Image (tube, grey):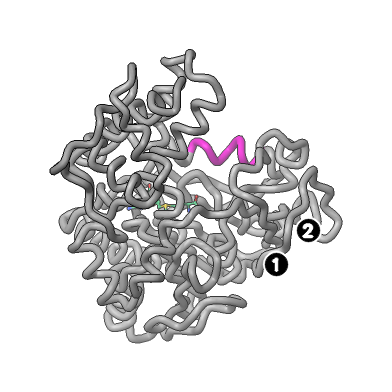
Amino acid sequence: MTPAARVQTSIELLDTIIGAARSKGAPADRILADWFRGNRFAGSKDRRAIRELVFSAIRACGPAPETGRAAMLRLAQVDRSIAPLFDGSNYGPAPIGDDEAVAADGAAPVWLEGLLQESEIGAQEAKSLLERAPLDLRANTLKADRATLQLPAAAECTDAPNGLRLDAGTPVEQWAAFRDGKIEVQDTGSQLACLAVGAKPGETVIDLCAGGGGKTLALAAAMDNLGRLIASDTDRNRLARLAPRAERAGATNIETRLLDPNREMDSLADLVGQADAILIDAPCSGTGTWRRNPEARWRLDEKELARLTAVQSHLLDIAAKLVKPAGRIVYVTCSLLDEEGAKQFDAFLARYPHFAARAPNIPIGRPRGKGTRLSPLHDGTDGFFIACAE
Ligand SMILES: C[S@@+](CC[C@H](N)C(=O)[O-])C[C@H]1O[C@@H](n2cnc3c(N)ncnc32)[C@H](O)[C@@H]1O
């Protein structure tokens, strides 16, 4: 493909991505993967270049652009090598017109930028939410030790006790250490959220929103496979991914429970007052993970945020029933909005005055409300709010 044809293809893919964000359809990654699968004439260099163009254009726009072309024209304002490729050549984009619409700059749609500001995320910190994330690993202590792990590429240690950092795009899935379950791909912020649980061998621990089990596996390792670890979620497909991952990681103390939304206690009744620790890795806006899903900014609206905060509050109520007297609840969201973090946790403490907040025992982050906030700019992690109640 010519460089101009790559730009035109990227514009068309951006049109699909913008439409899918509006209709809450497929994520950008899947749209690209499907296109690459169906268009084998695009070689590996083309694929890399198109991917780079599409994601750079998404990152360069704040609010959702009207069209893929407007998004690419916005990128052309940042990257001067692009405008000359609007050359009207065969398969290339038409020349740039005099009054053509260019998508707006910014970190997010205007309403969301307002909420970030209210949560004291300044412009620089908001922009850093869109930078490329490194690739973080966790050495799985059930099978390996960070200090002695042999990997094909040099990795630096992170602030998480078992964390390692590599360049984005390192093909770790092809490594023997990955296949053997010695390493897991996991952002340092996620690793620290698990550390905050302080799970110990022999305890009863509930990972209430376990999803595909990324954090469950870290908890199993912290427990050295001893004790009960209950992984629950309402999403059958996500929960189904846990068993093969646990097998690879050598995690043997995990029980899964599929929950019915709004009837979660039906499947958890036997655990009332039983848990030493509960991790609530609550569903959230994901504002802290825009580095990986930059178009997620265009999917969120006020109605969805209100739905998410209601679910978060409901999950905190469930955890209050499941925890033992003197047990601990760790509330986590990968969001930087106070609505889902500090304010949500304050509301919980107001509803349950017999719980007290305790500062999470993690090595980085800054206090936010009664919890700790991690951010890409300050901590080099995804954005997180982590709070503990006892
Ligand atoms: C942030 S994700 C969890 C990610 C997971 N802990 C990990 O580390 O891979 C939030 C999860 O909450 C689940 N969820 C949503 N509503 C729920 C509910 N009412 N009860 C339990 N889980 C719920 C979603 O299905 C989703 O998997």
| Residue at image coords 41%, 57% | 130
Tell me the element at label 1. loop
Q: Residues within 10 Å of mark 2 (few under 14, many from 20)?
A: some
Amino acid on which the number 2 mark rests in the picture: Arg
User: Which residue is label 2 attached to?
Assistant: 146
| Residue at image coords 34%, 71% | 123
**Is 57 displayed left or right of 380 in the figure?**
left
| Residue at image coords 55%, 41% | 242
Tell me the element at label 2. loop
Against 163, residue 85 (above or below) is above
> Residue 209, position in %: x, y?
43, 54
- Quadrant of res 90: top left
Give the dominant element type of the magenta stretch: helix, strand or loop: helix
> Residue 3, position in %: x, y?
44, 28
Camera-side residue of 111 and 316: 111
**Is 76 displayed left or right of 386 in the figure?**
left
Task: Report the magenta residues as a range.
Answer: 240-247
Amino acid on which the number 1 mark rests in the picture: Pro
User: Which residue is label 1 attached to?
Assistant: 161
> Residue 319, position in %: x, y?
40, 66
**Is 374 displayed left or right of 362 in the figure?**
left
Camera-side residue of 284 and 281: 284
Look at the numbered discs 2 and 1 and tell me whether their residues touch, using CB distance below 8 Å. Answer: yes
